[in-house]
Amino acid sequence: MMYKAMVFAIAVLAFLIFNPLTAHAKSEAERDIEVFDALQGRVVAETEPSTSLQKDAAYFLQHMTDVYRKVSPIPNEGYLVRVPLEPPVEVNNEWISGLFDEVIIIYSTDEAPFLLVFDEDNRARFFNFKGDATSFLATVLRRAKQ
């Protein structure tokens, strides 16, 4: 059981890391917000990033409250929302510092949303944060259906 969860987590992380390298003809600044359904194992919605959605995601990133401490952070059910940030957002706190050009918000059916970012060494880092992530997800899904 643990092996299966670990393989799933690695597959999701590989998808999130390498998905921008697929055959999309978009530049870095034109990347879409993507909603990945963990249960289905695929992107289920995409929308262009708006200024307000990017500001909300930047707010989440700048308002980290702690390191996410669970061993298996990728949920079996829920969503992972990848948000490109243009311009990149600077974060300097006790856990991480640097410029970030994307953030992934992880929504689990079991707990409050949390963040995934990749540091300068491309290591996955997970954080709790303040903000209305539920409204954010609703807005992304509503915009994706238009």
Image (spheres, helix red, strand yellow):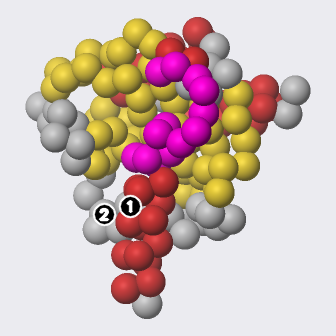
Q: Does the magenta stretch include residue 19?
A: yes
> Label 2 is placed on what type of residue?
Lys
Q: Height in image: 129 above or below 61? A: below
Q: Could you tell me residue 62's position as x and y percent?
A: 33, 22
Q: Which of 2 and 130 is in front in this view?
A: 2
- Residues under labels 2 and 1: Cα distance? 6 Å
Q: Could you tell me residue 77's position as x and y percent?
A: 60, 65
Mark nearest the camera among 2 and 1 is: 1
At 31% from the left edge and 32% from the top edge, which residue is drawn?
Answer: 64
At 41% from the left edge and 56% from the top edge, which residue is drawn?
Answer: 13
Task: Say what secondary structure mark 1 lies in.
Answer: loop
Q: Height in image: 133 above or below 113? A: above
Residue with the most extreme right position: 146
The residue indicated by pointer 2 is: 70
Q: Nearer the viewer, residue 143 or 108?
A: 143
Residue with the most extreme bottom position: 1
Q: Could you tell me residue 58's position as x and y percent?
A: 42, 20
> Label 1 is placed on what type of residue?
Pro
- Specify the label residue 51 is tagged with: none
Q: Residue 39 is drawn in which quadrant?
A: bottom right
Q: Height in image: 144 above or below 98? A: below
The residue indicated by pointer 1 is: 73
At 53% from the left edge and 42% from the top edge, which residue is drawn?
Answer: 22
Q: Is residue 79 left or right of residue 103?
A: right
Structural crowding at the residue carrying mark 1, measured as other residues with C-alpha within 10 Å and reported as few (<14), some (14–19) or many (≥20):
some
The magenta-colored residue range is 16-28
Q: Is residue 40 left or right of residue 24?
A: right
